[in-house]
């Protein structure tokens, strides 16, 4: 005996969702034909999504019941007869978010949904007629085979819905982890209304007409199985939530450590920059002081004092200063003249320089001095000296050498050892020289010459 029964089922799911549990053979056929069409275009198959199929089947039933399309609204519109957000979808896509948000409003699917729709306007829709209609529409065809603006869209979920004169397909980029819809046999049509409740679940009111007791028992068994699956899914979701919480905590700790490390690096970098600034400042000040020191040295001791060689020439006037006391009283008529030159090399610091070199002197006694030294001399007496001379700090000279004494045209000469001691006064490029030379002759008597001259450094 058949009875009119009203069955109220409460199914509690963590995301407040009811999925269509099965698809019709025509919906399965449409899915297969779309996948074959994509395969012919070299594209991969798209997994059938329980979430998006629920959205598709809900929408075709809403379109069938509400007849929403008119001069302003197209088939992407939603009525106000459900818990979803209603909208009049226009061709300018001003209400695009009304489409995109439907999977999140009706299911646990977290991505956007993109819909193509086909209407027969009074006639029944088949899988072939719907797909052929979409193939003939460039905009809809591009969605199916990823062309145009959809070329970079990677579809990971698809949902199918067909009801009398309407067919819709929903596409999504995110993977759907809900159960895949199964093919249903010829079972009675169930009118589904899925309002959200505040208790965290969804109440489904199924008005089943002409159902016998066996069918009711089978339906109860399916509900029990669904509750078992839902309970298992809830356990899995809770476990995943705990793992997510743990990962979030670890991520927070890692972010804190990264922030601390970044702060430490910034502090060290700042300290490094400060040290470099101090170093550059000190280096700059050192260079200034070094330049000043060099300038002072150059101003006091000219840069040409750094040359390696010493070369000097000079003129002098000399007077016999040591000879058995003959010249007890200075007589200017005895003054004679001579010249000298020195070549050597320097050692020591520039402003404390010492020099060592060879000094050559040539002096000639005048007639008075020649007669006083040798009353028999008919020619002027000449003195030639070669000595090794050392200049100490450029003001004191000391030399050792040999003295050659001869006269013009005379074949006789004397070579005697000599020693000299001098004092140099004046600027660096010229000096007034006071020099005393002593010579020991063959009679072991000491004679000497004192000279006063002007020497120039070239």
Image (spheres, rainbow, N blue to C red):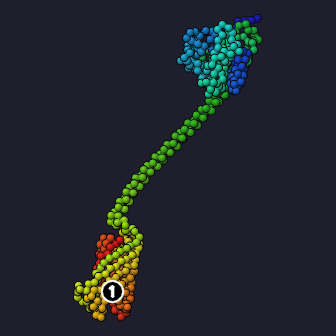
**Residue 187 occupies quadrant:** top right
Pinpoint residue 5: horizontal percent, then vertical percent: 70, 8
148 or 182, which is in the foreground?
148
Classify 151 as above or below 218: below
Pinpoint residue 286: horizontal percent, then vertical percent: 39, 57
202 or 123, which is in the foreground?
123
- The residue singled out by tag 1 in the image is 382
**Residue 92 occupies quadrant:** top right
Q: Secondary structure under badge 1?
A: strand
Classify 152 as above or below 434: above
- 444 relative position to 206: left or right: left
Pinpoint residue 224: horizontal percent, then vertical percent: 71, 19
Classify 24 as above or below 301: above
Tell me, yes or no, if residue 35 can be seen here. Answer: no
Residue shown at 66% from the left, 26% from the top: 156
The quadrant of the rendering that contains the N terminus is: top right
């Amino acid at each position: 005996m058949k009875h009119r029964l009203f069955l109220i089922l409460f199914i509690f799911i963590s995301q407040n969702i009811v999925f269509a549990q099965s698809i019709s053979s025509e919906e399965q056929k449409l899915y297969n034909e779309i996948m074959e069409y994509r395969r012919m275009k070299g594209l991969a198959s798209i997994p059938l999504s329980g979430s998006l199929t629920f959205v598709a089947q809900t929408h075709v039933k809403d379109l069938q019941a509400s007849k929403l399309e008119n001069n302003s609204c197209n088939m992407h519109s939603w009525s106000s007869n459900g818990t979803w957000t209603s909208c009049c979808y226009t061709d300018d896509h001003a209400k695009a978010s009304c489409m995109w948000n439907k999977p999140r409003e009706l299911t646990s699917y977290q991505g956007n949904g993109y819909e193509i729709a086909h209407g027969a306007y009074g006639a029944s829709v088949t899988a072939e007629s719907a797909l052929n209609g979409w193939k003939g529409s460039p905009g809809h065809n591009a969605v199916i085979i990823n062309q145009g603006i959809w070329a970079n869209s990677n579809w990971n979920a698809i949902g199918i819905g067909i009801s009398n004169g309407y067919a819709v397909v929903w596409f999504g980029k995110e993977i759907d982890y809900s159960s895949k819809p199964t093919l249903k046999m010829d079972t009675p049509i169930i009118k589904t209304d899925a309002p959200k409740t505040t208790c965290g679940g969804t109440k489904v009111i199924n008005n089943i007409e002409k159902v016998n007791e066996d069918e009711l028992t089978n339906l109860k068994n399916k509900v029990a199985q669904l509750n078992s699956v839902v309970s298992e899914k809830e356990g899995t979701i809770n476990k995943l939530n705990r793992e997510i919480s743990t990962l979030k905590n670890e991520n927070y700790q890692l972010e804190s450590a990264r922030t601390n490390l970044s702060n430490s690096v910034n502090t060290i970098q700042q300290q490094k920059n400060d040290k470099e600034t101090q170093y550059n400042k000190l280096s700059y000040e050192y260079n200034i002081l070094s330049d000043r020191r060099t300038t002072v040295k150059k101003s006091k001791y000219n840069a040409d004092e750094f040359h390696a060689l010493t070369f000097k020439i000079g003129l002098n006037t000399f007077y016999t200063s040591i000879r058995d006391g003959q010249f007890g009283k200075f007589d200017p008529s005895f003054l004679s003249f001579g010249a000298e030159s020195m070549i050597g090399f320097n050692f020591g610091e520039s402003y404390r320089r010492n020099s060592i070199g060879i000094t050559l002197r040539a002096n000639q006694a005048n007639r008075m001095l020649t007669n006083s030294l040798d009353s028999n001399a008919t020619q002027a007496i000449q003195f030639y000296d070669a000595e090794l001379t050392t200049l100490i700090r450029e003001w004191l000279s000391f030399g050792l050498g040999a003295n050659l004494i001869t006269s013009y045209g005379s074949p006789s000469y004397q070579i005697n050892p000599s020693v000299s001691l001098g004092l140099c006064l004046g600027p660096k490029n010229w000096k007034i020289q006071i020099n005393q030379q002593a010579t020991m002759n063959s009679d072991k008597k000491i004679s000497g010459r004192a000279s006063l001259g002007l020497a120039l450094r070239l």
